[in-house]
Amino acid sequence: MPIEEAGPAPHFELSDASGALHKLSDYEGKYVILYFYPKDDTPGCTKEACSFRDLSAELQDLNAVILGVSPDGGESHSAFIEKYQLPFTLLSDPDKEVMASYGAWGEKNMYGKITTGVIRSTTLIGPDGCVLKHWKRVPKAESHPAKVLEILKSFSV
C-alpha cells in the first residue's frame, strides 16, 4: 500500500543503536522526520546525515524529531553517530519490513542497472500521526534536509 499524504503513517517499532525500541506512537504530539538511507558512513548517507545534524536545532525548535532508518545494526549506527556527532536517533530495520511499508525498499536504478535495495526517501509525519509530506525518492542527499526544514516551517506556522 503506497504512502498517501494526509493518510495515517504506517506503524513502526524498531531498535536504536543501544537496542531500545522506538514506536511511532512514542512521538505523538511531535513532527517526525523519518528518513530512510542505504548505509552508514557512505558518501551520500554521510552528507545527508550531517545536513540533518547541522539543521537539528532548528528542526527541534519546530517540535520535530529526526529518525534515520537503515538496515545497519546497532554497532554500525553507534560508530556512525559517534564519528559525525549526530544528535538524533538511528533505527535498524534489518528485515526491511518498515522500509517496505514506507516505499523505501524496492527496485531502483543505480548507474543504469536495476537493483533491489534501499530507496533514499523521507516521510514527514504530523503530530497526529498522519503523513504531511512524502518524498518517494531523494535525488540530492546533501540539500534534502533544507527542503524538509522549509516544508516543516510551512506546517508549523
Image: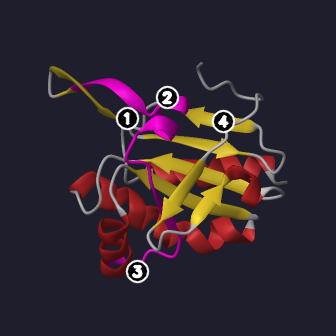
* Left or right of residue 21, residue 130 in this image: right
**Quarter of image, res 107:** top left
Q: Residue at x 37, y 67 (%)?
A: 74
Q: Which residue is mark 4?
A: 10
Horizontally, is 110 left or right of 12 in the view?
A: left
Of marks 1 and 2, which one's residue comes earlier in the chain? 2
For mark 3, what is the residue? 85
In x, y percent, where is residue 88? 53, 70
The answer to whether the residue labelled 3 contacts the one labelled 2, judged by CB atoms less than 8 Å apart, is no
Measure the C-alpha gap from mark 1 to mark 4: 17 Å
Mark 2–mark 4 distance (CA, rounded to whole Å) = 11 Å
Q: Residue at x 77, y 38 (%)?
A: 130
Label 3 sits on what residue type?
Answer: Gln
Residue 59, placed above or below residue 151: below
- What colour scheme was applied to this rendering of the protein? secondary structure
Does label 3 or label 2 sit earlier along the sequence? 3
- Secondary structure of residue under mark 2: loop
47 drawn magenta:
no
- Region rendered in magenta: 84-109
Could you give the CA–CA distance between mark 3 and mark 4, rounded to whole angstroms? 29 Å
For the residues carrying marks 3 and 2, which lies nearer the camera in this image? 2
